[in-house]
């Protein structure tokens, strides 16, 4: 009977590969975590610190030194990070050389509510707690409750995306009629925006008024600018 050495060699090679993989995998699992690496998207760690992320990565551990890799559950750690009120998304990974890493995307505020309760409204239209580490330079909102967030959010989102509005609008107030009043950074007239509807048209009317009043050097002459009417801007002069 002729022996097929090619089959024997292939089988022996397969056994060797499986053995080496199993040995390497077992050895890798027993390897200790050497250090933590935290990366923030856009290189910003404004609202949650790297130290705070480290504590969430290894909860109830003073140090990662001599902590075996096989006792870590990356999904549990990732979920723990995702529940942090300042974090929008987290991805946790473990490298073969013993580094535990996390890529953190923080929530981004676009307005700040102040009153009996102070908090941010984030880019997704949800309430977000203030941070002890950093204060965002965003417009303030006055006289709203959390049930009003969905109502005011389209207006706030428009201000955040529009360079002209982002530069000039500093305060949004909700009056007893459910209408919104805007205040500007450089001028003391108030803008009666009305309800948070027809936003694009009202903003275009505001820009047209601003351009004309700036050209005529009349921006300081007005007390009120009313955008409530469909196709016109009604202005009230001082005095």
Image (cartoon, helix red, strand yellow):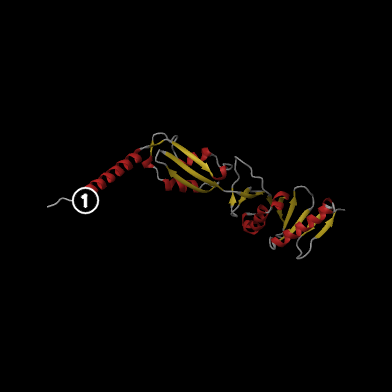
Q: Position of residue 138 (x, y in %)?
A: 66, 48
Between 1 and 119, which is closer to the camera in this rendering? 1
Give left or right: position of 165 versus 238: left
Give left or right: position of 84 versus 138: left
- Which residue occupies the extreme front position in the image? 2
Q: Secondary structure at mark 1?
A: helix
Residue labelled with disc 1: 7
Q: Residue at the spot x=70%, y=63% of the render? A: 198
Q: Position of residue 39 (x, y in %)?
A: 51, 42
Q: Residue at the spot x=23%, y=49% of the render? A: 11
- Which residue occupies the extreme left position in the image? 1
Vertically, is 193 above or below 112?
A: below
- Which residue occupies the extreme bottom position in the image? 230
The image quarter containing residue 136 is top right
The tally of labels here is 1
Q: Position of residue 34 (x, y in %)?
A: 42, 35
Vertically, is 156 above or below 81?
A: below
Give left or right: position of 20 versus 187: left
- Which residue occupies the extreme right position in the image? 239
Between 60 and 43, which is closer to the camera in this rendering? 43
Give left or right: position of 18 versus 113: left
Q: Residue at the spot x=53%, y=39% of the render? A: 50
Graded by Cα atoms within 10 Å as few (under 14), some (14 to 19) or many (20 or more), the crowding at tag 1 reads: few
Q: Position of residue 236 (x, y in %)?
A: 83, 57
């Amino acid at each position: 009977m002729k022996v097929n050495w090619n089959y024997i060699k292939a089988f022996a090679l397969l056994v060797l590969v499986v053995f080496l993989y199993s040995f390497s995998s077992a050895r890798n699992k027993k390897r200790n975590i050497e250090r933590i690496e935290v990366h923030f998207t856009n290189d910003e760690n404004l609202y949650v610190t790297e130290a705070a992320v480290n504590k969430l990565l290894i909860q109830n551990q003073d140090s990662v030194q001599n902590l075996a890799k096989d006792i870590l559950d990356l999904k549990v750690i990732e979920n723990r990070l995702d529940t942090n009120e300042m974090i929008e998304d987290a991805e946790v990974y473990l490298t073969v050389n013993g580094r535990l890493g996390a890529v953190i995307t923080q929530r981004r505020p676009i307005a700040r509510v102040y009153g009996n309760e102070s908090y941010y409204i984030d880019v997704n239209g949800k309430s977000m707690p203030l941070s002890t580490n950093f204060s965002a330079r965003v417009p303030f909102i006055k006289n709203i409750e959390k049930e009003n967030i969905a109502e005011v959010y389209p207006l706030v989102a428009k201000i955040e995306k529009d360079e002209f509005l982002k530069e000039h609008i500093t305060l949004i107030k909700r009056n007893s009629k459910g209408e919104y009043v805007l205040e500007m950074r450089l001028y003391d007239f108030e803008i009666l925006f009305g309800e948070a509807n027809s936003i694009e048209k009202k903003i275009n009317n505001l820009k047209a008024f601003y351009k004309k009043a700036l050209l005529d050097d009349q921006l300081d002459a007005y007390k009120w600018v009313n955008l409530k009417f469909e196709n016109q801007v009604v202005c009230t002069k001082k005095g």
